[in-house]
Image: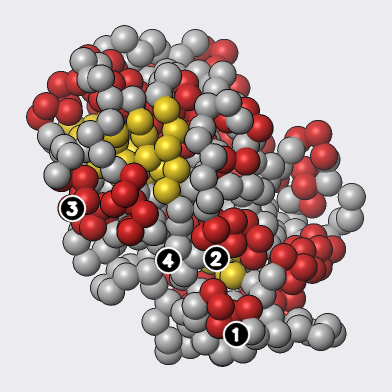
């Protein structure tokens, strides 16, 4: 444990006044929750909104609703994504099917997706990873022939905008996460947006069976959120980061997560959420742009698709190779810079899925595992941190250097001393 200014890989702030007022939510019936649902419905022009205890719970509920009365059981997801996605699929008693990912876009390899989608597929999950918009329109086009539902995974992209529309509004149904490191947080929480009367009816039927959370669970979330508020600050984050048993930053697969409706305390924590979300995303963009300018990438387009406005939940960088990635992460840990290696394996390498998933070659996803790091962009990143990150990424005092380019191909990247491909 080293006492020093330490950045968390990702973070979201909650106003102190909302934390202090949240316990009053226990006495307010469903006032804040109902208002939250109405506000979300208006901002995203959704047919219906449902709020739950987590993003995993939201996805599980969607999948259970879609599976009712359908013989289809296959759910297509990116081979590189958050482990919470396959955990929700397994909890819903459905089959995980993988499609490889393009390292230069973090989106599906669409030629492969075309071959994977068929009449046995229940739904496909295009994913806005790290806040960068996926090509949902192209996914919908491929799914239309087989009448496959498109479930938009916008867990990491609340507030992002593509040329087609805001993240979370382009699929048939979508979900957001309100976890501790997301663009907007209530400690934990999940949101479902439905854009179809038929799907709304199915989801509503499942939602009616979801229980309210027990008081103990509500209070535990509030206490954990208070602790997060205190220790997420870079002046104190060194303390929890130095306690291995907390498992901060670890990626785990598990299916025993609870599914509850969002409680009033969480909903109360989200007062003023729309303005907070916009402010958070403006700050993330500013941090990302300052970092890119310091790296000599200013003035270049850094985006996944034309006319997209990413929210930079984290800034993803593709390093030259695995050893370069390891070196960067090691140096970051030593000085508390918050650079993260992210998901440790492709989805098919998760041990708990060994007998539940068809093994296939996913070279794009494997390439991302080997080379990707992400850089913090959250509200606690200051100019001194930008300078520190720049020194680490530019290989100051080492034999690595970052050339100036935006979206090189994977092969081009490997030919460079220590290459970066910005999404």
Distance, label 2 to label 3, CA atoms, is 28 Å
Q: Is residue 178 left or right of residue 114?
A: right
The number of callouts visible is: 4
Report which residue position mark 1 lands on.
295
Name the residue carrying label 4. Answer: 105
**Around disc 3, counting alpha carbons within 10 Å, would you say few (fewer than 14), some (14 to 19), or many (20 or more)?**
few
- For the residue pair 241 and 106, the one nearer the viewer reads as 106
Q: What's the distance in space between the residues labelled 4 and 3, CA to CA?
A: 19 Å
Dots 2, 3 in contact, CB < 8 A:
no
- Residue 147 screen position, x and y as percent: 16, 37
Q: What's the residue at 81%, 63% (across, down)?
A: 330
| Residue 130 visible within the image | yes
Element at badge 4? Answer: loop
- The span from disc 1 to disc 4 (Cα, nearest Å) is 20 Å
Determine whether the residue tagged by mark 1 lies in a helix, strand or loop: loop
Circle nearer the viewer, 3 or 1: 3
Q: Which residue is mark 2?
A: 316
Q: Is residue 162 above or below residue 186?
A: below
Which comes sooner in the sequence, label 2 or label 3?
3
**Number of other residues with Cα within 10 Å of mark 1, as a class: few under 14, some 14 to 19, many 20 or more:** many
Vertical placement of residue 168 versus 83, above or below: below
Q: Residue at x 33, y 59 (%)?
A: 111
């Amino acid at each position: 444990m080293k006492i020093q200014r330490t950045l968390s890989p990702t973070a979201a702030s909650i106003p102190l006044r909302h934390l202090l007022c949240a316990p009053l939510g226990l006495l307010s019936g469903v006032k804040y929750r109902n208002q939250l649902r109405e506000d979300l419905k208006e901002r995203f022009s959704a047919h219906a909104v449902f709020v739950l205890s987590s993003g995993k719970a939201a996805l599980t509920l969607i999948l259970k609703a879609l599976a009712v009365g359908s013989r289809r059981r296959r759910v297509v997801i990116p081979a590189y994504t958050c482990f919470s996605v396959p955990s929700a699929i397994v909890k819903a008693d459905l089959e995980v099917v993988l499609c490889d990912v393009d390292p230069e876009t973090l989106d599906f390899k669409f030629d492969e997706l075309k071959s994977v989608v068929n009449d046995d597929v229940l739904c496909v999950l295009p994913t806005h990873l790290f806040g960068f918009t996926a090509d949902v329109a192209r996914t919908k086009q491929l799914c239309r022939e087989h009448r496959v539902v498109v479930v938009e995974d916008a867990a990491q992209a609340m507030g992002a905008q593509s040329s087609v529309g805001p993240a979370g509004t382009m699929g048939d149904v979508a979900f957001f996460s309100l976890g501790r490191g997301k663009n907007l947080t209530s400690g934990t929480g999940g949101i479902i947006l439905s854009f179809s009367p038929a799907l709304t009816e199915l989801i509503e039927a499942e939602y009616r069976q979801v229980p309210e959370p027990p008081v103990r669970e509500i209070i535990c979330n509030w206490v954990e959120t208070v602790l997060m508020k205190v220790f997420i600050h870079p002046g104190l984050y060194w303390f929890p980061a130095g306690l291995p048993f907390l498992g901060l930053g670890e990626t785990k697969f598990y299916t025993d997560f609870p599914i509850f409706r969002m409680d009033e305390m969480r909903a109360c924590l989200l007062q003023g959420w729309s303005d907070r979300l916009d402010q958070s995303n403006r700050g993330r963009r500013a941090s990302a742009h300052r970092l890119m300018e310091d790296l000599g990438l200013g003035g270049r387009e850094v985006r996944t698709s034309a006319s997209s406005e990413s929210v930079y939940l984290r800034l993803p960088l593709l390093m030259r190779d695995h050893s370069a990635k390891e070196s960067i992460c090691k140096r970051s840990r030593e000085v508390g810079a918050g650079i993260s290696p992210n998901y440790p394996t492709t989805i098919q390498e998760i041990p708990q899925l060994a007998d539940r998933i068809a093994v296939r070659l996913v070279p794009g996803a494997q390439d991302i595992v080997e080379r990707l790091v992400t850089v913090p962009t959250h509200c606690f990143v200051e100019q001194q941190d930008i300078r520190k990150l720049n020194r680490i990424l530019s290989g100051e005092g080492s034999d690595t250097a970052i050339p100036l380019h935006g979206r090189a191909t994977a092969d081009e990247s490997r030919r460079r001393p220590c290459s970066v491909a910005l999404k």
